[in-house]
Amino acid sequence: MIIDTHCHIYASEMENAEEIIMEAADNDIHMVLNGTDPSSNREVLELSDKYDNVHAALGYFYTLADEITDEEIELLDMQLGSDNVVAVGEIGLDYYHTKDNRDKQIELFENMLVLAEKHDLPVIVHSRKAMQDTFDILKEHDVVGSMHSYQGSAEMAQQFIRLGFYIGVGGTITHKNNKKARRMLENTDINHMLLETDSPYLSPQEKMGEMNTPLNIRYVSRKIAEELDMEESDVIEITAENAKALFNI
C-alpha cells in the first residue's frame, strides 16, 4: 500500500476525480483527501463513503479567514464526528499571498486546532512564509499531525518533529532548483516523513505542465529513495506505516 497523505481529488477541482480515485485503487494507492471549505468538505465526505481507498480530512483554509461564520464552524464540528474522518485539514497560515489579515488567519487556525483537540484528531497544516507563527501556535495546543508540503529549514523541521509532527514530502522534492528541500530531506529521519502529492497541484519535475494525480506518488518515493540511498520499497513501506499510525488508517 502507498498512502498519499494530501490531495484534492474531487469534482470541484477536476472533472475526472472518481476515475482517478478508481485508478489509484487499482494501483494500491490510498489517499487522504483534504477539504478546504464547506463545499469541498462535503465532497470529501461523500467520496470517503463511496471508496475504500479514500480517507477524509476536513478543514477551513486560510482563504476563508475574512468570511467564516459561526454556523460554518458548527457545521465542521458536526462533520468531524463522521466515521471516515481521519484529520482536520487543510488548515494553516499563508503570508505569501497576504499578511493584511494575519490576525484573522490566526484566529481561524486557532479555531481549527481547538476542534482537532475536541475530536482527538491530527491536523494537516499548510504554512507558507509563516513558519514561526505556525510553530508558536502549534506548541500551545495538544495536537499532532503533518506539516504539508513543508517549506522550512532542516533545523525547523526538527522542532516540528519534537512537537509530534511528520514532514510531508511531495512533488517539489523532485524540482531541480529545490536544494533547500533536499537538504531538509537529508537531515530528517524517514520515520518522520509522509508521502503526498497535493494533487492536482505541485506536479513532480517529470510531469511539469500536467495535472498532478496520486498516481505520481511514485516519483516522490523514488526521489526520496535516491537522496537517502534507500530501496524505494522501504520508503513506501515506512511512510505508509507512518501514515497509518498518525491517521489511524
Image (tube, rainbow, N blue to C red):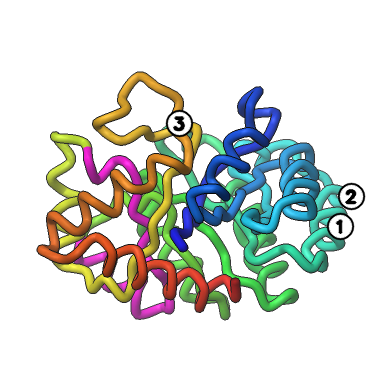
Is 32 situated left or right of 232 in this image? Answer: right
How far across and down, in percent of the image, does residue 125 sit? 50, 56
Q: Secondary structure at mark 2?
A: helix
Number of numbered labels in the structure image: 3
Name the amino acid type tagged 2. Glu
Q: Residue at x 81, y 62 (%)?
A: 77
Neighbourhood count class around disc 2 (C-alpha, 10 Å): few under 14, some 14–19, many 20 upward: few
Q: Are marks 3 and 1 in contact (CB under 8 Å)?
A: no
Q: Is residue 70 above or below residue 242?
A: above
Instruction: Indicate whether residue 119 is drawn in magenta.
Output: no
Secondary structure mostly seen in magenta is: helix
What percent of the width, then of the height, locates residue 5?
A: 49, 56
Mark 3 or mark 1, earlier in chain: 1
Q: Residue at x 77, y 63 (%)?
A: 80
Whether residues under marks 1 and 2 lie with C-beta atoms below 8 angstroms apart, the answer is yes
Q: Which residues are magenta?
A: 154-174
Distance between the Cα atoms at labels 1 and 2?
A: 5 Å
Residue pointed to by mark 3: 97
* Mark pair 3, 1: CA separation: 27 Å
Toward the front, the furthest residue is 26
Residue at the far top in the pictured view:
209
**Residue on which the image places disc 2:** 71
Where does residue 146 sit, x and y in percent of width and height? 46, 63
- Residue 161 location, quadrant: bottom left
